[in-house]
């Protein structure tokens, strides 16, 4: 999986005078499942649509298999795309929906029948061939949309939030189906979602975007454990990473009223950063709560407790910030004083001005 399939070189997209994608550099390897992830409006669909040829590229180069595709029409790009709303033909049976595109592309009759039969079985749609889209459930319609795209046997498969109309359980089984499809056909996937769980479970790599700019392109593990900046640290993980301002004096981190001795493994990175003002990131799942004060603990006051089923979220005031910790215990009361510690190897330090990480120690 080392050959490049899709490459965006300094790609920008303007709508009128508004730049919605800025200088995007992105390579997708052959057979890779790359996820475009980010908040609503960050430019995921626009990026996908430029790759598909449904939007023009305002500047930069879009390369597929080493060829510049900026001016190649969508129909000539040999790409399959699945949309959020499925876009099935309402007046055609399921079988026809799948076969139609192949017939338009002059695939011979026997081959069309063979492919339709194959995708119907892969997606568990046997028995529904003669029904119309209106007579199917949302999950079945979504599988027909996938089946139709797979039947084309394109080597590039673009998916724009294909599971967003499904309920939580169906999403999980649909994710497994997608993985099965990928195992069978080894297409290059570019998959748009704003759901981090979907991104983490489906992606070989994730491209996390914000306001039309790439924030980080890395494996799910790196995105979670090695966030490049404050935005990445806060976007990935639920509940979100706590971020608080700290000031370094000698080898001490100072909050407003609390202080902590900085772990010595951090000192070289801190010295290399130059500034003494940082944003400290701590994941809620990396904090230990206690009702008893102990050396090195920081303290706060419980504001609210959230039930997550197997665990509890404890929201508390820490100086002027609000923080959240995940606890195995349910024994927390609003208004009570609590003490928390965390392993400094698991914390993140970001430069306060650039909000970029200064490095990692574990
Ligand atoms: N045809 C258009 N004309 C003008 N602006 C547009 C057009 N299409 C999209 N935009 C703007 O471009 C930006 C990126 O939109 P895009 O649909 O790519 O975001 P997205 O990340 O896919 O969002 P969502 O998750 O909500 O679908 C948004 O600010 C959007 O309003």
Image (spheres, grey):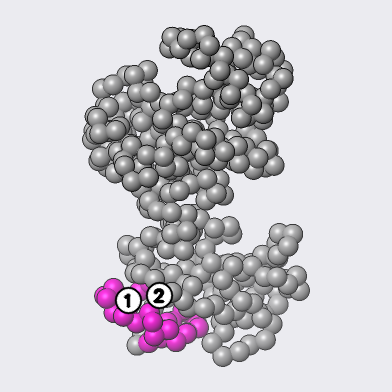
Q: Position of residue 149 (x, y in %)?
A: 51, 24
Residue 329 found in image quarter: bottom right
Residue 48 found in image quarter: top left
Residue closer to the observer: 90 or 284:
90
Does 356 appear above or below 329?
Answer: above
Residue shown at 56%/71% (left/top)? 286
Does 111 appear above or below 248?
Answer: above
Using the rendered image of the protein, determine whether residue 89 is visible from the camera's viewpoint.
no
Residue closer to the observer: 119 or 66:
119
The residue tagged with tag 2: helix, strand or loop? loop
Quadrant housing the N terminus: top left
Dot 1 alpha-carbon crowd within 10 angstroms: few under 14, some 14 to 19, many 20 or more: some
Spatial CA distance of label 2 from label 1 is 9 Å
Q: Position of residue 340 (x, y in %)?
A: 60, 79
Residue shown at 29%/44% (left/top)? 25
Residue shown at 58%/73% (left/top)? 287
The reply to whether the magenta stretch includes residue 263 is yes
The reply to whether the magenta stretch includes residue 38 is no
The residue tagged with tag 1: helix, strand or loop? helix
Q: Verify CB contact (< 8 Å) between mark 2 and mark 1.
A: yes
Residue closer to the observer: 194 or 4:
4
Direction from residue 9 to residue 344 in the image, left or right: right
Q: Which residues are magenta?
A: 251-278
Residue closer to the observer: 31 or 91:
31
Does 360 appear above or below 309?
Answer: below
Dot 2 alpha-carbon crowd within 10 angstroms: few under 14, some 14 to 19, many 20 or more: few
Q: Position of residue 284 (x, y in %)?
A: 58, 67
Q: Which mark is residue 361?
A: 2
Determine which residue is flagged by label 1: 269
Residue shown at 67%/70% (left/top)? 327
Q: Residue furthest bottom?
A: 295
């Amino acid at each position: 999986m080392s050959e490049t399939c899709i490459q965006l070189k300094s790609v920008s997209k303007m709508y009128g005078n508004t730049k919605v994608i800025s200088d995007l550099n992105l390579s997708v390897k052959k057979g890779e499942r790359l996820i475009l992830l980010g908040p609503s409006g960050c430019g995921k669909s626009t990026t996908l649509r430029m790759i598909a040829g449904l939007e023009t590229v305002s500047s930069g180069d879009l390369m597929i298999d080493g060829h510049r595709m900026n001016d190649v029409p969508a129909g000539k790009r040999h790409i399959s795309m699945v949309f959020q709303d499925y876009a099935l033909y309402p007046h055609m049976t399921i079988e026809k929906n799948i076969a139609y595109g192949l017939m338009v592309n002059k695939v011979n009759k026997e081959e069309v029948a063979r492919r339709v039969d194959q995708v119907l079985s892969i997606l568990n749609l046997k028995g529904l061939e003669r029904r119309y889209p209106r007579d199917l459930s949302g999950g079945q319609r979504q599988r027909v949309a996938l089946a139709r795209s797979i039947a084309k046997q394109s080597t590039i498969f673009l998916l724009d939030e294909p599971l967003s109309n499904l309920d939580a359980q169906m999403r999980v089984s649909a994710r497994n189906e997608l993985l099965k499809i990928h195992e069978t056909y080894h297409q290059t996937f570019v998959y748009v979602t704003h759901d981090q769980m979907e991104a983490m479970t489906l992606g070989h790599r994730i491209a996390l975007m914000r306001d039309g700019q790439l924030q980080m392109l890395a494996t799910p593990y790196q995105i979670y454990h090695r966030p490049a900046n404050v935005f990445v640290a806060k976007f990935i993980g639920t509940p979100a990473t706590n971020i608080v301002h700290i000031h370094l004096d000698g080898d001490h981190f100072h909050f407003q009223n609390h202080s902590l001795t900085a772990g010595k493994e951090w000192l070289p990175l801190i010295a290399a950063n130059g500034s003494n003002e940082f944003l400290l990131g701590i994941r809620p799942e990396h904090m230990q709560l206690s009702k008893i004060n102990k050396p090195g603990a920081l303290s706060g006051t419980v504001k609210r407790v959230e039930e997550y089923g197997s665990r509890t979220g404890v929201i508390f005031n820490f100086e002027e910030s609000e923080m959240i910790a995940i606890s195995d215990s349910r024994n927390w009361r609003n208004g009570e004083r609590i003490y928390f510690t965390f392993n400094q190897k698991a914390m993140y330090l970001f430069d306060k001005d650039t909000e970029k990480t200064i490095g990692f120690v574990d």
